Amino acid sequence: MRVKVDKSSDALYFRLDESRIVESEEVRSGVILDYDQNERVVGVEFLNISSRANPEELSGINFQSV
């Protein structure tokens, strides 16, 4: 899994695996899902991330495993 914060496009992207993306869909305003050929979600992008989180929150993302 990869997590990328792109300051120039003001986006946060979670790439779940490296399958080829064949379709993307904006499921809510500013939330885009990327699908592979089997219609599985392989990526999630959040646009306008600066309005959703402050820079300190984005610089230290915490992962929790349950």
Image (cartoon, helix red, strand yellow):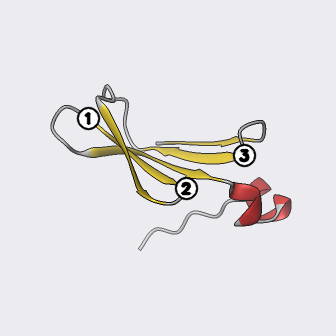
Q: Check the image and name the residue furthest to the front.
A: 29
The answer to whether marks 1 and 2 mark residues whose Cβ atoms lie closer than 8 Å is no
Left or right, 64 with reference to 41 = right
Q: Residues within 10 Å of mark 3 (few under 14, many from 20)?
A: few
Disc 3 target residue: 10
What amino acid is labelled 1 in the image?
Answer: Asp
Left or right, 45 with reference to 6 = left
What residue is rendered at 46% in x and 68% in y? Answer: 65
Name the foreground residue: 21 vs 26. 26
> Considering only order in the chain, which callout, 3 or 1, is on the residue closer to the N terminus?
3
The answer to whether 19 is drawn above or below residue 3 in the figure is above
Q: Position of residue 54 (x, y in %)?
A: 81, 65
Residue at mark 1 to residue at mark 3: CA–CA distance: 24 Å
Is label 1 or label 2 in front?
2
What amino acid is labelled 2 in the image?
Answer: Gly
Q: Quadrant of residue 62?
A: bottom right
Describe the element under mark 2 as helix, strand or loop.
loop
What amino acid is labelled 3 in the image?
Answer: Asp
What residue is rendered at 69% in x and 56% in y? Answer: 49
The answer to whether 18 is drawn above or below residue 57 in the figure is above
> Considering only order in the chain, which callout, 2 or 1, is on the residue closer to the N terminus?
2
> Considering only order in the chain, which callout, 2 or 3, is on the residue closer to the N terminus?
3
What residue is rendered at 52% in x and 69% in y? Answer: 64
Disc 2 target residue: 30
What residue is rendered at 15% in x and 37% in y? Answer: 38
Q: Check the image and name the residue furthest to the bottom.
A: 66
Q: Position of residue 34 (x, y in %)?
A: 37, 41
Residue at mark 1 to residue at mark 2: CA–CA distance: 20 Å
The image's mark for residue 20 is none
Disc 1 target residue: 36
Describe the element under mark 3 as helix, strand or loop.
loop
Left or right, 19 with reference to 45 = left
